[in-house]
Amino acid sequence: MEENAKKPGLFEEGGPLGFLHSTVDAFETFLRVPGTVSLKGAHVRDSVDLKRIMIIAVLSVVPAAIFGMWNVGYQHALATGTTASILQNFWFGFLRVLPLYIVAYVVGLAIEFGSAQIRKEEVNEGYLMSGMLIPLIVPVDVPLWMLAVAVAFAVIFGKEVFGGTGMNIWNPALLTRAFLFFAYPNQMSGSDTWIHLKKGETMIDGATGATPLSYIREGADALTNCGAQYGTDVWTMFWGGVPGSVGETSVIAILIGAFILIYTGVASWKIMVSSVAGALLVGWLGNLGGDAIPAYWHLVMGGFAFGTVFMATDPVTSPQTECGKWIYGFLVGAICVVIRLFNPGYAEGMMLAILLGNTFAPLIDHCVVERHITKKNKKAKIA
Amino acid sequence: MSNSTIDLKKGLSIPVSGAADRIVSEKLVPDTVAIQPDEFKGFLPRLLVREGDAVLAGSPVMADKKNPEILLTSPVSGTVKEIVRGDKRKLLAVLIQSDAKQEYVDFGVQDAAAASADCVKSTLLKSGLWPAMIQRPYGILANPGITPKAIFVSAFSTAPLAADTEFTLADECKAIQAGITALSKIAKVHVCVPCSSSAFAKVKDASVHVVSGKHPAGNVGVQISHISPILKEETVWTVSLTLLSAIGKVFSEGKLILDRKVAVTGPCAKNPSYIETIPGMPISLIGKMACPDTEVRFISGDILSGKNVGKQGYLGFFDNQISLIREGRDTELFGWAKPFRFNQFSATRSYFSRLCPKKKYDMDTNLHGGPRAFVMPDSFYADVLPMDIYPLYLIKACIAEDIDKMEKFGIYEVLPEDLALCEFIDPSKNYIQSIIRKGIDLMLKEMA
């Protein structure tokens, strides 16, 4: 008997390096689709898996990431009064953003691999998307150790304690940002955060690092002040040559991502559309109440577009039901603009709006499903 | 009779290659057939024969322990060759050696139109065709002691490569009509046809419904949910069209005739076509129809919900299809990362297979991924389930073993086969049908 018992391999359960089983499996299945066959039930399966869905999601963010890197360099050049070519600007930004990516992925994936091993599961691909988003929603100058702490917090307390990807309540990438925002507010807001300056560099006279959104808080007059530096017309804010978090500024790049997500069906267009509708409605009500900012500006300013397309549509933390998606998207858009209109201390509302939306998503679903069941039972009684 | 038209938008037709040509390539007369009690959910077998006993087609072989009137009978005449038992002496199958004379037990020719409900029931019980009736909820052996709300017959199947009933049963319309007339004595009969020009659209003594759409429009569970949903404490019975024709013949000819045309299909079938045979036929008889040099999975039934019986297995009592597909045990370098995978199908747009809708794929049994927690939302799964339920909520209630929620989210309305497409498209590669099966088993245990 004992001779026949197969010795566990080096990385298999019970083998000498068994504690690396999930990690090795993750790398192996990353390279090759395994030869596992269906054991029961449906004998054939769709060729789609979570790896494919996640890679599409990651690809959809790439245009925004590339633009963001270029914009880091461009804003630096504007603020210091130097001139640089497109490639030079991109390279400048790339070198600033790359460390953020390395930190976000190394810290986050290490925790994912570790917890998958503890749960004896395969590593879930969900973090690939979170790690792609995190560097794009923080200021470029965020200290790396802060980012590491924030990522660890978000992945452990936002995801793993609930049971990993698929079980989490809040979007892990946004939790990272929320942690940074509340733990280290000085590094996360104000006009010095959004433009990277090397040691010893100073801004030229009249230049500022303030974003259009923070200017608007001071009134429309102030907005024209920064026009000299980066232009604050809607078109500039649309194509993205303004200061802000790395990936959030260019609506064009984000729309390319939105197209990929909607075409492939990876993200829900319903959430995107209703979020825009919610923002426009509240913005319009704000106009009636005397706010000077045209409602549609909210769509191109700050993190609204980025949040709507990439973060609010996370399939795990958004509602499960079609009807719930409409409600949730509308709430996210509306709450975002409400925060922008009424909160003097903090100009941006998208992060809190989505986290609030995530919190209420199960409740929205619950109401939708309950209502459906009540209706169905009534119909059955009549029939 | 009242007629209605139901057009289902949701669903998915899986473009797998190997559809059977509409010809009967062979008539297979097996010299051994198997009767397998496990096929009948809720049947606790008590053996009525011993090895060496002589039987006729229609002679009882097993009876249900709880309800001894329910019999399983032999489809052929001959002798009991072997009683196959598994662990703890569990009865797996009774093998019957056929004598090739095919002599029948005479049940007496009856006019179905003149028979009473009790008479219909007793004929079905003694002929061994009672187990053809499946009781919902739960998909179990029908209880002869109750009267169901209705009896449903799906006259077509939309399952991948399913046998075309317009071909297999076109010349059995008379028997089918006799079967419907007989069953209509027990309860109202609903027949669902794919289009109004169907050969079975003109049956009498039943409500005919036209149900059109992609798979699972042909699943009787889906049809029930649109015509007369099952509520708590209600039961309906279902019977397949193939077995309905056998029921008809018991009345019109007085004999148990289970002969049927069976589609041999799938990418690994050399000449996908129909064979004429009887249930319990050893699958090895069609071994020569499978591609050589590959490891083939022999499935009695379709590729979504059929049973992997292996080459040594037997054709199931309910099945009129055998699917042959390759075991996809090979790995694929960078499979998920390739921009194109021309030879693989995906219902999602994350690949480009939607751009060539006519293409048929040589599918295999590879999972194309590893098991994960559910990530995609309920609406993703609901897209292939034309029923008024939230599939993911039901699945999660089953996983949580929460009886109240299972009841609320529609466990009465479904059988695992209805959610087979959810399992097919699931990027998290869960065994959804098995989860639903466990949920149903739990309900059965709790409600008993």
Image (cartoon, grey):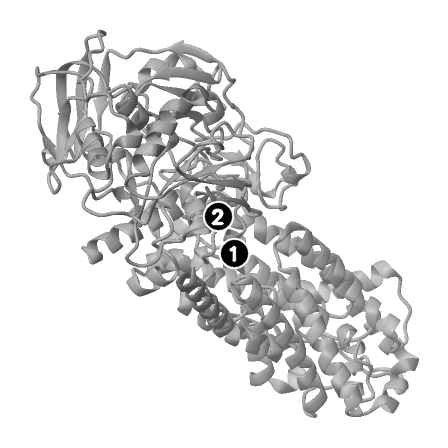
User: Does label 2 or label 1 sit earlier along the sequence?
Assistant: 1
Left or right of A310, for residue B429 = left
Return the x and y of residue A168 as percentages of the image width and height.
47, 67
The secondary structure type at the circle numbered 2 is loop
Q: Which residue is mark 1?
A: B376
Identify the subunit bearing mark 1: B
Q: Nearer the viewer, residue A374 or B33?
A: A374
Q: Which mark is residue A279?
A: none
In-front residue for pair B104/A171: B104
Does the image show residue A124?
yes
What residue lies at 59% left-to-right and 59% top-to-bottom? A129
Name above or below for residue B80 compared with residue A119: above
Graded by Cα atoms within 10 Å as few (under 14), some (14 to 19) or many (20 or more), the crowding at tag 1 reads: many
Secondary element at image label 1: loop
Measuring 79% from the left and 83% from the top, which residue is drawn there? A210
Give the chain letter at badge 2: B
B328 versus B100 height, above or below: below
Instruction: State the image coordinates of residue A209 (x, y, percent, origin top left).
Output: 79, 81
For mark 2, does the 10 Å Cα neighbourhood hold few (<14), some (14 to 19), or many (20 or more) residues? many
Q: Mark 2 sits on what residue?
A: B426
In the image, what residue type sits under mark 2? Asp
Quarter of the image with the C terminus of chain B is bottom left
The alpha-carbon separation of the residues under discs 2 and 1 comes to 8 Å
Residue A229: percent from the left, percent from the top? 89, 79
- Give left or right: position of A45 versus B447: right
- Dots 2, 1 in contact, CB < 8 A: yes
